[in-house]
Image (spheres, rainbow, N blue to C red):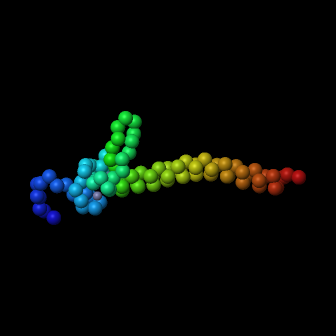
Amino acid sequence: MSHDDGGGFIACVSCGGLAAGPCARCRKPVCGDCCVLTSGGAAQWAVCLACDKSEGRSLRRAWLTVFGWLLTPLLALFTAYALLYWLFGD
Ligand SMILES: [Zn+2]
Ligand SMILES: [Zn+2]
């Protein structure tokens, strides 16, 4: 892969078609079919499907982490309370 056609044709990284523009996140060229438009504030930009998918996944993982951090101490407290009640409660 050392050829350089130097033409105006930029291949989409996803399907190999004519790219419409670079992804706003990874800067890889993508065509209109392989990107999603993301609106943020006043601007609207195109993000490739890979970046869109990875962001959604990481976002969900972040939420799971938050829930984990919230629930773990609550669960530990509840377990301790139940154990104490079971041992000393009448
Ligand atoms: Zn494409
Ligand atoms: Zn991208």
Can you tell which quarter of the image residue 42 is in? top left
Q: What residue do we see at 41% from left, 51% from top? A: 55
Q: What residue do we see at 25% from left, 51% from top? A: 20
Which of the two residues, 18 or 57, is positioned nearer the viewer here? 18
Could you say where residue 21 lies in the image, as x and y percent from the top left? 25, 49
Residue 53 left/right relative to 7: right
Could you say where residue 48 lies in the image, as x and y percent from the top left? 33, 53
Q: What residue do we see at 22% from left, 56% from top? A: 18
Residue 85 left/right relative to 19: right
Which of the two residues, 76 or 61, is positioned nearer the viewer here? 61
Q: What residue do we see at 55% from left, 48% from top? A: 66
Observer able to see residue 25: no
Residue 1 left/right relative to 12: left
Asked if 13 appears above or below 42 in the picture, the reply is below
Considering every residue shown, the one lying at the far front of the view is 33
Can you tell which quarter of the image residue 49 is in? bottom left
Considering every residue shown, the one lying at the far right of the view is 90
Residue 8 left/right relative to 38: left
